[in-house]
Amino acid sequence: MARDPDLVQKGFGLKAAVAGELAADYRSRLIEALRGRQGLLDLGPIKFHLAEEFGFCYGVDRAIDYAYEARRHFPDKTIYVTNEIIHNPFVNNRLREMGFRFFEDGHSISSIGEDDIVLLPAFGATVEQIDEIKKKRAVIVDTTCGSVMNVWKRVEYYGRDGYTSIVHGKHYHEETIATVSRALSEGGHYLVARNEPEAQMVIDYILGVGLDREAFLEKFGPVSSEGFDPDIHLEKIGVANQTTMLANESAKISVMLGAAVLKRDGHSENFREFDTICSATQDRQDAILKLGNRHPLDVILVIGGYNSSNTAHLCKIAGKFAPAYHIDGPEAILSGESIQHLEHGAAETVVATNWRPDNKPLRLGVTSGASTPNSIVAEVFSKVAALYGLDPMSFIGPEEGLEIVEV
Ligand code: SF4
């Protein structure tokens, strides 16, 4: 795949040329200044505590950089994006403004002409989709994150060796859909387990103490490969995961499944595992744990797109320490009393009241998902500070945060 001349898996040598534009669109002097203050911004009536690791991960940084470079390199060409490039509405809309055409806006593979460019998002695309796009002879700019590709390699290897991939993930998430397509492409099977209770059902079946075959297929048929037979395809299993799941839950599921196979067989030859949580996800999850353990907080705001899996998981962790709200940007703060947010696992946002306790100073924890621009985080700071009649930038020195923004 990498030798295909129409498949570009790197930038166009324009990193420096687009750096200013990227900084203007997504960076924030306020947030960069906070990095130099251990994340603390004390405005008096409100104390912001920003997590040590937050926001754009290396995969997202790279995907957006490639998109901007592609636009610059092909100024007159039509560029399609097969999905959201990342799970952040602000970034996707910015690309729309730059002329990118998204499949989710009604375009499709049939829209592509051979002079066009097709951008694959950071979480990749399925084997079939890529094959179909290649037939169009368009240039493909592949921004798939290397950490996602590592999972694919693992799953392909399981498939080649006759192991069924048990993927800890969300079966409808684009990354997981792309991942399981790799198992199929190697003639393998897969089953997606969303969480520990679902993994336990698989374990119970392996040990012969759970659902009967029919009930098992009813439960897992829709999230497993066609022709999946639990009596055959749970004999040899390999574990993988969507890169943005809760790291400790993935690790636990892997240990549980390994122990079940060992108990059933008396050996571990029929079990394979590999930690496929990406380091950026791990770092952000560790950082919110650290923030919560280190500082007493009244509220935590977790900022990211509502379809961002890693943001949802950060919010779940944050909720152990204080009321935590997953919001997608400053507009979610409706007033000093009410906030629009997404509860964990819910499909629709709800409005919570009295989100801001009136003790002073308010101790507010903040973090953001791997696809959230710092500019959005800064707008949330400003919106919250405005509730107190304050401007956070007036608390930042004239030189603070400048060196990083001016790329
Ligand atoms: S969250 Fe991890 S796997 Fe996903 S794009 Fe970022 S670095 Fe890559």
Image (spheres, rainbow, N blue to C red):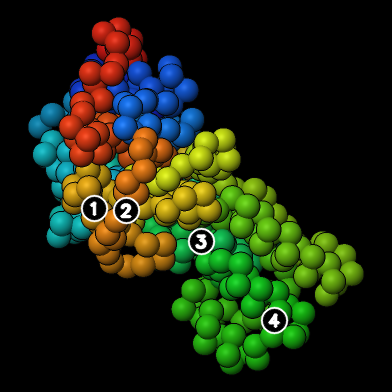
Q: What amino acid type is highlighted by mark number 1? A: Glu
Q: Nearer the viewer, residue 252 or 139?
A: 252
Q: Which residue is located at x 82 percent, y 62 percent?
A: 269
Q: Work out whether 402 lies above or below 309.
A: above
Upstream in the sequence, badge 4 or badge 1? 4
* Residue at the disc numbered 1: 337
Q: Which residue is located at x 68 percent, y 58 percent?
A: 252
In the rendered image, the residue lying farthest to the top is 399
Q: What amino acid type is highlighted by mark number 3? A: Gly
CB under 8 Å between discs 3 and 4: no
Upstream in the sequence, badge 3 or badge 1? 3
Label at residue 355: 2
Upstream in the sequence, badge 1 or badge 2? 1
Q: Nearer the viewer, residue 290 or 142?
A: 290
| x and y percentages locating residue 311 in the rendered image | 41, 49
Left or right: residue 369 versus residue 375 is right
CB under 8 Å between discs 4 and 1: no
Q: Nearer the viewer, mark 4 or mark 1?
A: 1
Q: Nearer the viewer, residue 277 or 4?
A: 277
